[in-house]
Image (cartoon, rainbow, N blue to C red):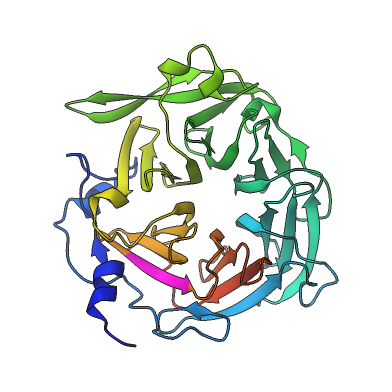
Amino acid sequence: MGDNGGMHRRHFLRFGALGGGTLALGSLGFWRNVYAAPPTPGIGPYGAMADVADANGLRLPRGFTSRVIARSGDVVPGTDYVWHMAPDGGACFAQPDGGWIYASNSEVSPDGGVSSVRFDAKGQVTGAWRILAGTHLNCAGGPTPWGTWLSCEEHRQGLVWECDPTKPGQGVARPMLGAFVHEAAAVDELGRHLYLTEDTPTGRFYRFTSAKWPSLEEGTLEAAQVISDARSGARVRWVPVSPLTSAAQQANAKETTVFAGGEGCWSEGGIVYFTTKHDNRVWAYTPLTHRLEVLYDAATYPGAPLRGVDNLTLSKAREVFVCEDGDDMQLCLLTPDRKVTPFLQVVGHPRSELAGAAFSPDGKRLYLSSQRGTDGRGVTYEVSGPFRTRPA
């Protein structure tokens, strides 16, 4: 591996407290403890990316390998199923036999929907099928603790569809989760709430409270109002809104806070993480304390290594992996020891974006897609290697 000083200034950058406050706290105290320490220089936990891409066009750290799982328009190897166009958000689901399923959205219109690909306990592909059809611009979404996939439509009257990833079928619309330009969804199992992002310049950050947990058929939808306090920092108050349209179009719109271009959303360990693309930020919301904080803000750093923030996921080591929409097509990570660093880069896909990052249930394999590949057809990858599987 080479050592280019300019690349390191661009790619390996520490991040510190923003806006005068501390960084993500979390009800379990994990992030509070690590951010109590002073920042340290250096690259990320997996080392620098290779100077040269592998045979699949990925620059990876030493010890990591990749394989192509599927290409849009082609039959998934080992199955008779043709993989969908424009693969976007995705998640993995553990299966009783030790295998797992990766569900992936299709961000096209008409007939977007979702596909699943099945792996056995050894990681071999054993099947693939459609779990949602007849929907439009299925962008991101999120898994539920009860084993379903929530697929979000990204258009003005977009709905959230709850799907069973384990077998061919048709998902069920959940209109009480709102009709707007949906992006992603995340379930906070501890607090029994579901959180949603909205991908418009005047988007909001939403919370859904089920009338009968864990059913998503009935409940209350609210949008965040951020309140600043000199002593406790930014806190969130929740304002009830109608599920029939965007909160930005409602009579009480001024009571809710704009999050410009909501993107990925993930809940883990009592913290809800989400990204906003128009200001290139990664946020952390702690439901127990109602505290909202900024983990990363690209504007703070000249030549920031992470831009075009999009889908995100967490490793078992609680590293936050963030996909780039465009920029230099990297998957970057924010580490608990205060680094922001690229983990991998897809080379030769200048008009594409990365999406659908998700770990296998054991945390040892990572799935993601280049949505438009080199020729307009998406490519879905698996990356294997020495991922950390527990917090340091």
Residue projecting furthest to the top: 251
Look at the picture and state if 2 lies above or below 210. below
The residue range painted magenta reads: 341-345
Q: Nearer the viewer, residue 289 or 104?
A: 104
Residue 306 located within the stretch drawn in magenta: no
Classified by dominant secondary structure, the portion drawn in magenta counts as strand
- Where residue 330 sits in the image (x, y, percent)? 44, 66
Q: Position of residue 10 (x, y in %)?
A: 28, 68
The answer to whether residue 78 is left or right of residue 251 is right
Q: Residue at x 77, y 67 (%)?
A: 73
> Along the line of sight, which residue is nearer the eye, 139 or 291?
139
Q: Nearer the viewer, residue 372 or 221?
A: 372
- Residue sitting at 30 percent across and 39 percent down? 293
Q: Is residue 158 visible?
A: yes
**Magenta span contains residue 342:** yes
Above or below: residue 206 compared with residue 388: above
Q: Is residue 328 left or right of residue 129?
A: left
Work out which quarter of the rendered image holds the C terminus and state it.
bottom left
Residue 331 to residue 68: above or below? above
Residue appearing at x 22%, y 71% in the figure? 42
Q: Is residue 192 left or right of residue 160?
A: left
Left or right of 245: which side holds 391? left
Quarter of the image containing the N terminus?
bottom left
Which residue is drawn at the image coordinates 61% and 79% (left, top)?
67
Q: Residue furthest left?
A: 38
Horizontal and vertical percent position of residue 108: 71, 51
